[in-house]
Each structure stands twice: as structure tokens, then as C-alpha cells.
Image (cartoon, rainbow, N blue to C red):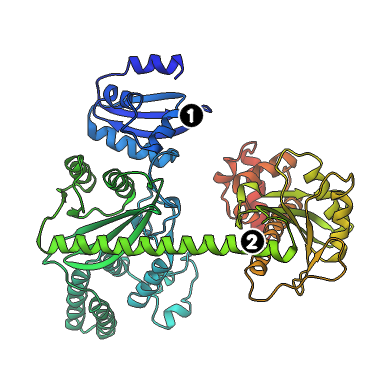
Amino acid sequence: MNSELAEKLMHLPDKPGVYLMKGSQGEIIYVGKAVNLKNRVRSYFQASRNNSAKVLAMVARIADLEYIVTATEMEALILECNLIKKYRPKYNISLKDDKSFPYIKVTLNEKFPLVLVTRRVLKDGARYFGPYTNSGAVYETIRLLKRLFPLRSCRSLDAGRPCLQHHIKRCLAPCTGTLKPEVYDEMIKAVCLFLEGRSDEVVRELRRRMVAAAQKQEYEQAARLRDQLAAVESVIEKQNIVTGAGDQDVIGLASSAAGSCVQVFFIRSGKMVGREYFMLSGSEAEDEIEVLTAFIKQYYSRSTFIPREVLLPLGLPERHLFAEWLSSIKGGRVMVEIPKRGVKKDLVTMAVDNASIVLREAAARMEADVENTRGAVIELAAFLGLPSPPERIECFDISHIQGSETVASMVVFEGGQPQKNSYRRYKLKTVEGKPDDFKSMQEVLLRRYQNMTDPLPDLIVIDGGKGQLNAALEVIRRDGTMTVPVVGLAKEFEHIFCEGNSQPLILPRNSKALYLMQRIRDEAHRTAIGYHRKLRARRNMVSVLDNVPGIGAKRRKALWDYFGSLTGIKAAEVEALTLVPGMNRKAATSVYEFFREGKK
């Protein structure tokens, strides 16, 4: 422990707050909260016999710390949740891939709201439902909603005439300007109730409106509502009544050496309307109380709906604090309970059992993946006659169109798995405008192996046949010091050409080794093609902007960096264009008018 850190530990306050542990590079490696900062933070650096291996590893890496004093433990809890979401520290337990969880968004901030899928929750006046872990289920829900309700799907309302969706009774055609907003709003209210799981309320409202329309002799409207009512009732029949009434989240937890899984049952108005499971990373060596505590903080800090009751599988020291926190979010009383008997206990047991099943299946998949990838590497070594399985494999590919924007990719597989942090992309110059795959391959190999800052691979794969392999060997064997095995993978029949052998090696069609080689080759091809397309799009964008008065090289680059694509620049209004660094209103107007004139 350095002297600066020791000095901070001596002057910690006896107050609630949040502490941030930092590594040697100033990065935040852990965020925690405490009722008493002095006691909690100092406990990490005292007798370590009761600490887990994970905590010991974290403490060994702490080079500095910061703390933020709060007025109450509740404020500390809220701040901790926000900081964990912001920094995603290495040693905090976290929901896997929680950044990309999809939500269903209802754009209530528009006159005629859309219902769509998004992965970003913004404070824009829209209503969000989620998060969901299964994106396929989300899109299936959207398709179901569009069958139940004639929602608009187009982004623009200036079409002037209805599209095919209106003619097949899938849209009320607000684009025509004849639809009353209150009619559409009634439907959107029903959509939101449906997404909340309140199907009974949807049925009652649809029946009321159907009867009212019939009494007014609006028979076409009544028939449409009748069809919606029948469709919703058919969905409700699939939902099981599990409790008398109320909104509940039932949480089950299972842990093993493979990690932890939390299963959540969503019960709305006494019916189970769905379930989701969440895998947590960094939880292998933690006790279940800490895992469940971390899940509740992270899940409910981003959840868009808080039920009246949360049922837990085990007691938590912070249970009453969580109840207070969730109540403040909901704006009404929320109970956090650990049921001991009855229907609620049965529900929690069912959630725990389901979490255990998911965890066992995940562990089995992981074991099978390891066996398959490791087995493929061993099998490949046997086919190629290598002395040992190639732990690190590097594969190279070239991409261009008639010699323009020639690029190369290098992908890396370790232990049969892609290591994307080690991928490299090269913009080649020696053959620009003159298509020559042999010289292109020699350039990229020379640039890769002329300095040895990166570790050498155990096998080099060249995407190509005998000619590409021979061109590659001229560079790799130029001074006789590199003895790494090199093979070429021909594209058409996936024959493998080995050094010193004129006949190709043909791997069995059902072999793991062939599948591994195909996967490596495809990944190299995908990376090279993606980089080539990016450069080509940038070149096309530059060539178009060259014709805009007042736009030079610096402004071209600034526009590209700000909007990311030519489509974004074309769609931007003058106000948005003026926000680009280096742009003024005159230049922004020039860009705006240039693309608008092209549409006339």
C-alpha cells in the first residue's frame, strides 16, 4: 500500500457514501456503497482470512481510492447504481451484455405514436418496456401487437395516401390526415396496458368501446373492435392464473462454478405474462446474498416497470432499503418479501428451479464449446502434422475492387476462439490502383512480422491457394529466422496447401478441423470486406462533398466524424449542421441546399 492511499484511509469520514477503488492506471476497478465509509473501506485492508480470492485479487490492485459522501444510505445506493452503470468496473458483479438489452418503445412524444424496438433508453417522453434478454421474443411481441392493433409502421406522416398496410386492415392511415388523434390514442393506451400485462383491462376497454360504437351505429368501427377483442382474448387464454391479484416480480437464483443465473417471473394482475433469465459475470466466487444484491441494484435501476411486490428466494440485509428505494422509483409502496409458505413460496421455488435448469444448460453448452474448439485445434494439428496443437492462429485476407481501396485483415484465434482485441486492419499502398493479390499479401505480412511487438503465432493461414502461399513464404522465410508453419486455404474447394507439398490436403467434410478453418477464413474475409466497404463509403462521401461550395478537406472530415455517414449528412437540418466543429451557418446552409436541390 502506497503512502498516499494509507493517508486517505486514515481520514475517511464516519458518514454514508460511495467509494471508488482505482487501479495503477487510474481506472475504476470497483464501486461500492457504505453506511459508514471509514469502517467499510478499511475492512478491505485488514485481516484477509475471511475475504474471497476475488476480493484479495482486487485489493492487491488498488492503487488509489475516491469517495463521495452522501446524506443518507438511500442516496448512496442510488449513486452506486449510477456509477456502476457508467464505469462497469472489473470487480463488480454485472449483468452480462446488459448494455445491449432490447426494449419496446412507444413514442408517446409523437402525435401518432410508433411501437418499435430500441436498445437505448432516453428521457425523450417515450414509454419503454423492458429490458428483455431475448431479442427474438421482443420482435415476436411487436408482430403480435401489429396483428392485434392497426398501428402505423411508417416513420413519415406526409405520404398523402394510405399504403398497403391500410388496405389490408393493418394500419389506420394517420398519414392521410383524416384520422382523429383521440381514436389513435385510445388504441395506444390499450397497447401500453397489454405490454404491462394488464390484458383484462384491455378486454374491458375494448368491449366498452365496441358497445359504444354499436350504439352509435358505427358498425364498421364496432366490427374492427370486435376483431381486436377476439384476438386479445385468444392471447389471454394462454396465460395461467397463478395468484389472486396484484403485480409481482418473482426472483429465483441459482449459482455454480459456471456462474450465476437469475430467473424473473413477471406476474401482472394475477397472471404470469412472461419471464426472463439473466446471467451474471464475475459472480463465480461470490456468495448468493452478494450476487442477489448486485442483481437487484442493476436490474431495477434500469427497469421500466416496478411492481407492487418483489418476492426473493433468500433474505438480504438491505431488504428494507431496497423496498424504500423501489417505492421512491415507483411513487407508491413496494414490498420486498421472502415468502415462507403458500402460493408465493411455490412461485419462488419454481423460479429457483428454472434458474437451475438454465444454469445447467449454459454449463453444458460451455463444456461442449470448449470440447469442440479444443478438439478442433488438436485434430487440425494431427492433420497438418504439427508437433503440438497451434494455440495461436493468425489468418490474412485481401479485399479490393479492381485494385482500388485495397485493404487486408489479420484475425487471431487462440484456443480455437476469436480474439477480437488482437485483430488488425491494414490499408495497403504499394499496389493501389493495380490489382495484385500476391504483392498485397507480401506487403501486409512484411508489415506484420518486421517487428515482433506482438507474439508470434503457432500457425499462419493465408486465404488463397498455392500462388498466395508461395508469395507469402517469400516474405516469411526471407531471412530464415521464422519457422512458424504456414498454410494456404483455397476458397473454392477449401483445400489446404502446405509448404513443400504440391498436392493439397483435403480435410474430411465432417471434421471439426475443417469447421475451424472455415470459421477462421470467414472471419478474416468478413473483417477485410467490412474495412473495404467503410473506406469506399468514405471515398464516395468525399467525392460528393467536393461539389459543395465552401466545404474543404477539414470540413469534410468534420462532417464525416460528426454524422458517421453520407445518409446522416443528407438528412441533417441546418441547425444540426451548424453544430459540427468548424461549420458556420453559411456553410451549413450550403450543404443543406446542395442535397435538397438534388431531390427536386
Residue 378's label in the rendered image is 2
Please identify, in this view, whether the residue under mark 2 or under mark 1 is nearer the observer.
2
Measured along the vertical axis of the image, is residue 482 above or below residue 201? above
Q: Is residue 286 visible?
A: yes
Tell me the element at label 2. helix
Tell whether 60 sits left or right of 407: left
Depth check: give the residue in front, 394 or 205: 394
**Mark 2 vs 1: CB contact within 8 A:** no
Question: In the rendering, at what x and y percent does residue 573 appear?
Answer: 56, 50
Instruction: Please name the residue shown 35% across and 18% down the image.
Output: 9
Q: Quadrant of the C terminus?
A: bottom right
Tell whether 98 sits left or right of 575: left
Amino acid type at image mark 1: Gly
Depth check: give the residue in front, 97 or 575: 97
Residue 23's label in the rendered image is 1
Instruction: Please name the residue shown 65% across and 65% down the image.
Output: 379
Amino acid type at image mark 2: Ile
Instruction: Please name the residue shown 29% across and 64% down the image.
Output: 354
Question: In the rendering, at what x and y percent does residue 280 appear?
Answer: 38, 51
Measured along the vertical axis of the image, is residue 49 above or below residue 178? above
